[in-house]
Amino acid sequence: MTDSPVADALRSRFEQAFMPNYGVPPVVLARGEGCRVWDADGREYLDFIGGIAVSSLGHAHPALVEAVTSQVTAIAHTSNLFLNEPEILLAERLLGLLGVPGRVFFANSGTEANECAYKMARKYGKAEGRPYFVAAENGFHGRTMGALSLTGKTSIREPFGPFPVDVRFVPYGDADALKQAVTEQCAAVFLEPTQGEAGVVPPPEGYLRAAREICDSTGALLVADEIQSAVGRTGHWFAHQHEGVVPDILTLAKGLGGGLPIGACVGFGRAATIFVKGDHGSTFGGNPVSCAAALAVLSTIERDGLLEHVRTVGAALAGGLAAVEHPLLAGVRGRGLWLGVVLTRDRAPQVQAAAQRAGFLVNALQPDAVRLAPPLVVGAAEIGAFVEAFPAILTEADA
Ligand SMILES: *Cc1c(COP(=O)(O)O)cnc(C)c1O
């Protein structure tokens, strides 16, 4: 029960109509503008989770509204039987930002982008006598069977095994363990540049470079899962660029469409042409409305200097929170506008609830870690408001 009869009625209808795979969320969101959202009762919140690192331009951004509206008016769908210009512009734009020759496949979600990478790696492995994959413990790559088989979190993988490919898991951030695990029989190594769902956990400096070297010396493909980290979230277009490492395959999704569903898989070098005609496809992939939205996201990030903005306000947010002295606060990790607030005890759900009562939406990601991923357009004043409210939120959660 909440204090709102409107929300309670909607929540109980949700519970009746939907499969029980989600808990029933606490808030019904009705509309948004910038970093503010309003619930079904008209109560206002500052959005510090952005639909899980998705709403890069915040809500109802004029550039996104205009791009989507004009595209849906022109033509909403073409299928892959026909070309559309937005998909071509977007693929070219992404390759330009990556600065490395490659080829793109468009899907509709993160897990599908990884499913594409998985099939590419599988095809490469079969041709080369490389039967297994390597991925990281506690990693998250998605919920479809291929992506799930790579997902290190046992509680969500175990109920659905066995899986078609042998995946060997190594502790994240341990370059020696990776070196041991990757041999000339390994087809591909799947890694997040920073583990998102595990609690926004960055690896030690140089880990991605070590992974690149290990893959180069054994011939395994390096797949960077940037579904959560790409498109400005860390203050760089892509997190791997910060480390100066080029993967063989890159996947992205969440922030790319600014709220419209789109995923992408990019192959570089030999990985660009693993697929031949007929190997893969998607009816909705390259949807012109999603591609127009993504083009608006990329242009706005560039036009408004949002990468630099993310670095500045992200540092202010991390610094402001880390400076708080509170027995419940262990530390803050992450980069840009992608932070994990680490607690000394398992009180993340209480912090989420206390933040919500104080008018902020955040996400209890792990029992002891809260994720912050506000829109990239979040203002300094909004950051300041959260930092100021934070000690009282911690105290309430600790009670
Ligand atoms: C969210 C996420 C996925 C899955 O994306 P969906 O769009 O939910 O399928 C995969 N990998 C990473 C790193 C993610 O953060």
Image (spheres, rainbow, N blue to C red):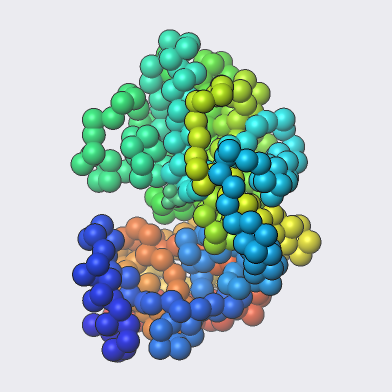
- 263 versus 376 height, above or below: above
- 298 versus 161 height, above or below: below
Question: What residue do we see at 61% from left, 73% from top?
Answer: 60
Left or right? Give the position of 24 relative to 182.
left
**Quadrant in which residue 303 is drawn:** bottom right
Give how far across and how far down residue 59 sits, in percent. 58, 72
Q: Is residue 216 visible?
A: yes
Question: What residue do we see at 69% from left, 68% from top?
Answer: 66
Which quadrant is the N terminus positioned in?
bottom left
**Quadrant in which residue 168 is drawn:** top left
Left or right? Give the position of 29 relative to 193.
left
Left or right? Give the position of 395 relative to 70.
left
Give how far across and how far down residue 297 sits, in percent. 67, 59
Count of numbered tags:
0
Give how far across and how far down residue 40 sits, in percent. 41, 84
Give how far across and how far down residue 244 sits, in percent. 67, 36
Which quadrant is the C terminus positioned in?
bottom left
